[in-house]
Amino acid sequence: MLRSFRSAVADARRHGDLYFAALLSQDRIEKAFGRARWLWQGWIYTPAVTVWVFLSQCLSPDHSCRDAVARLLAWRLARGLKLCSAETGAYCTARGDLPEEALHHLVRDTGQQIEDQSPQAWLWQGRKVRVVDGSTLTMPDTPENQAAYPQQKSQKPGCGFPIARILVIFSLSVGTVLEAAIGKYKGKQTGENSLFRGLHETLAEGDVVLADRYFSGWCDIALLWQRGVDVVIRKHQLRRTDFRQGQRLGKDDHLVSWSKPARPKWMSPAQYALLPDELTLREVRVHVVQKGFRTRSLVVVTTLLDADRYPPEEIALLYRRRWQAELHLRSLKIVLQMDQLRCKTPQRVRNEFWTHLLGYNLIRGVMASAASKSGRSPWEISFKGTLQTLSQFLPLLLSGISSEVWCQALLTAAATHIVGNRPDRVEPRRVKHRRKHYQYLCQPRRNYKP
């Protein structure tokens, strides 16, 4: 992992490419674009340059097109190249022409490569665990965005924002995005479990899916079992649990059989017929002894039936790590400011979504390299600290500092920022800062004008 990172940095400097070429090479971008890269060959905004500038925009705190173009101008000036216009029109046009499929492919490719290059010691019980979770995003209130991603029905027209639902599959070992989906917030087949079913093909036999109780339906578990994928999921609160029944494996640990329910409307008769008549599942009760948690006990359902290989304590610790998905989404939505996208058309919104995920994976790759060098685990290193360090180090690629010294200093600095291990900390749910007393917008803004 360290060797590949250092060689990528050296290649980028050798070819005089933009900053982000050290993390994502031009050959890799053109390979993902395939024939699409021949659709346009701009003088300045080639496919690779457009992706690099787009990445710099998504990872910048400013997030504006003007800031991204100014960064390109500064790089060309430092390289002694002819300057381009500071206007953002050409960049926005090139960014709008980026094929969504290519950006999507880059997200999958980078996320999988980082996991494949990571040490086996980072895996759970030698298994690849996929953490699944969903969230929502908003975008500018334009007619095009409203048509593709309507706002919530409870909001008056002109007072809300178009909203989209996203579903992300993370790698538990390195935290990268392996696959994702984006769709409408409401309507038929728009829930998180529906989006996840569309991504089942990305899961391989032997994988372990770690998710909350929203994904604990019988058919959802059966479809994964059919593919040879194990699950560790919290049991839904409406399902009754009685540890006096079934085959006892230990205290608060037993095997039970779940019978096949009626065919749901979203499943075809042919697909339903292929599912077994019942599933043998393992239920483990997890007791929460730490203070500060509202839940005192919960039941985890899993297809990992071997109690000797997977003892209850390991199942409990694994489910506790499901919280990392929430932290990864927070890094995406808060640190990278993906909670409010800025593009005004649906196609560009999706491109912005994939580019944020791509930038997130590149940061995770630096974190994995820093963790490997320092002997730590990737989840111990701060995502925001790595982003801040990388933002200051990338411009130094234009200096005379050697690639070896640059990589050494970057990874050492990134590994210094450790996330505090405070799982049992108790804090009151209070806010110190007072809100500003502005009235809410309850009708279109134009109605407020005199």
Image (cartoon, rainbow, N blue to C red):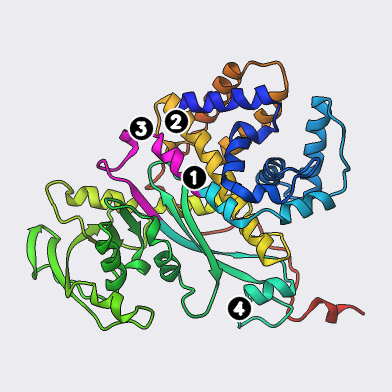
Q: Nearer the viewer, mark 4 or mark 1?
A: 1
Q: Nearer the viewer, residue 390 or 205?
A: 205
Q: Is residue 129 magenta?
A: yes
Give the distance between the C-alpha atoms of the residues marked 4 and 3, in whole angstroms.
44 Å
Q: Residues within 10 Å of mark 2 (few under 14, many from 20)?
A: many
Pinpoint residue 204: horizontal percent, then vertical percent: 33, 52
Question: Going from the N terminus, do you reach mark 4 or mark 2 first?
Answer: 4
Q: CA distance from mark 3 to mark 2?
A: 10 Å
Q: Earlier in the sequence, mark 3 or mark 1?
A: 1
Residue bounds of the magenta highlight: 108-131
From the image, which quarter does the N terminus lie in?
top left
Is label 4 in contact with label 3 (beta carbons under 8 Å)?
Answer: no
Query: What amino acid is found at the position of numbered circle 2 in the picture?
Result: Ala
Is any part of residue 250 visible from this angle? yes
Amino acid carrying label 1: it is Asp
Does 143 sit left or right of 10 as displayed? Answer: right
Callout in the foreground (1, 2): 1
Q: Secondary structure at mark 2?
A: helix
**What is the number of the mark on residue 423?**
none
Q: Residue at x 11, y 47 (%)?
A: 308
Residue 345 vertical position relative to residue 186 in the rendered view, above or below: above
**Residue 156 percent location from the top left of the image:** 69, 83
> Badge 3, how many Cα within 10 Å: few under 14, some, many 20+?
some
Q: Which residue is mark 3?
A: 119
Q: Which mark is residue 109?
A: 1
Residue ID for mark 4: 152
* Of the two numbered discs 3 and 1 in the rendering, the one whose residue sits closer to the viewer: 1
| Mark 3 vs mark 1, CA separation in Å | 18 Å
